[in-house]
Image (spheres, rainbow, N blue to C red):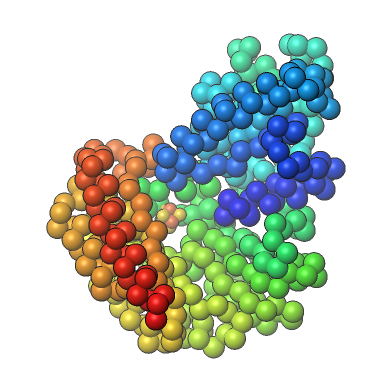
Amino acid sequence: MNVRDSEVVSGLLKNTGYQFVDKFEKADIIIFNTCSVRQHAEDKVWSEIGRISKLCKKEKNLKGSPQKAGTVPIIGLIGCMAQNYKETAFERSPEIDFVVGPSDIDKIPEIIHDLVISKLQAPGSRPDAKRGHSPKNRDSPLFERKIWETDGEFRPEEIYHTGFYEDKEHAYVVISEGCSNYCSYCVVPYVRGSIHHRYYKDIIKEIEEAIEKGLNKITLLGQNVNAYSQPGESFIELLKKVNDIKGLKEFDFITSHPKDTSIELFKVMSGLDKLNKRLHLPIQSGSNRILKMMNRGYAREYYLDLVQDYRKIIKDGILTTDIIVGFPTEAAEDFKETFNLVREVRFNCAYIFKYSPRPGTQAASLADDISREEKEKRHALILKLQKEISRKINKK
Ligand code: SF4
């Protein structure tokens, strides 16, 4: 989702007349598109902002730039961290000039325009408040030339039609934004908002536009694609329509939620000739007690039945998953159930994460009571098991 968001922002800026440079030292504007799903991802961004702005300052002081010599680039923080930290990001990292949440990315070109103008003006002047996006400025000098936009609800449809894709063959196409599942450990519903589905005709139009540009492989994207719904349209209906698009060679989708995945879906999948049948189906935990605490909405037995149905209907299907170890109160017994489930299902691949509390989520109110050493131990055990399984499958 973040890769696609970066393309969307790149497309908007390119169409406004900006150019990309190959090194950040040459840039007049640097934008960090960020992820809040784990603490580690956030920590990396804070340190990169400091490191890069220091390097740029040094570089530009030596060589000058298209802006005034000695000036530093405009730095933007966008994406989930922007939504999470809002204007407090400026306190944490004063190098940042603007903060824009995932539902406001359409405003980035205007915000940059205002900041460029304000940087060229005398110290103390403020961005032009007459522009459409209402820059908000606080009285503190720290906020004098800062802009933040984090109140948007929905993205305008036009942002998906800039025609900019990183790859020459493959395009990511968003079908729904946000998520309404509120898994207890997850920050996504808070930073990306409730689920919002794009109109299916707009999705088809975007795919046709991509095909016209020479791309012929598509990945349909959503936090929970199976929940896709529009009046008279379900995810299954959408898949059939995409399969019928002329010029499309291959497509797939990510991510599926077990509670919204069904045997009907597998039956339809098996009949679609352009659909890559791989399925990413996050289990998160093999323990029913932990699944309940995670608010996942299914039990271990239900998941195992789904896997059986998938394997029966989709011959040689590729099944992958996500797992979190060390969720609060996860006892040795709970972990054993996850371990045994991995052994039983034999996923082609699994993404295994150590739990880290995300502020504002339900689970953050629980004590993070599994020690770092224990989380690492459990992570290593499942990783070793999964590597062995993947190796055997791949060899075959
Ligand atoms: S389904 Fe759960 S884990 Fe996935 S994005 Fe939604 S809340 Fe987060």
Q: Residue at x 63, y 18 (%)?
A: 143
Q: Residue at x 82, y 16 (%)?
A: 121
Q: Out of 351 and 220, give the one closest to the viewer.
A: 351
Residue 56: quadrant of the picture: top right
> Quadrant of the image for the N terminus?
bottom right
Confirm whether residue 141 shows in the render: yes
Count of all numbered marks drawn on residues in the image: 0
Q: Residue at x 70, y 77 (%)?
A: 248
Depicted 170 relative to depicted 40: above or below: below
Depicted 88 relative to depicted 350: above or below: above
In the picture, measured across the screen, residue 106 lies left or right of residue 316, that is right
Q: Out of 232 and 185, give the one closest to the viewer.
A: 185
Q: Residue at x 73, y 64 (%)?
A: 168
Residue 67: quadrant of the picture: top right
Depicted 244 relative to depicted 365: above or below: below
Depicted 285 relative to depicted 18: above or below: below
In the picture, measured across the screen, residue 230 lies left or right of residue 305, that is right
Residue 366: quadrant of the picture: top left
User: Residue 340, percent across and down?
Assistant: 21, 67
Q: Out of 327 and 230, give the one closest to the viewer.
A: 327
> Quadrant of the image for the C terminus?
bottom left
User: Residue 325, percent across and down?
Assistant: 28, 52
User: Residue 52, percent across and down?
Assistant: 61, 30
Confirm whether residue 117 shows in the render: no
Q: Answer with the quadrant where ligand 1 appears in the image.
A: bottom left
In the picture, measured across the screen, residue 333 lies left or right of residue 40, that is left
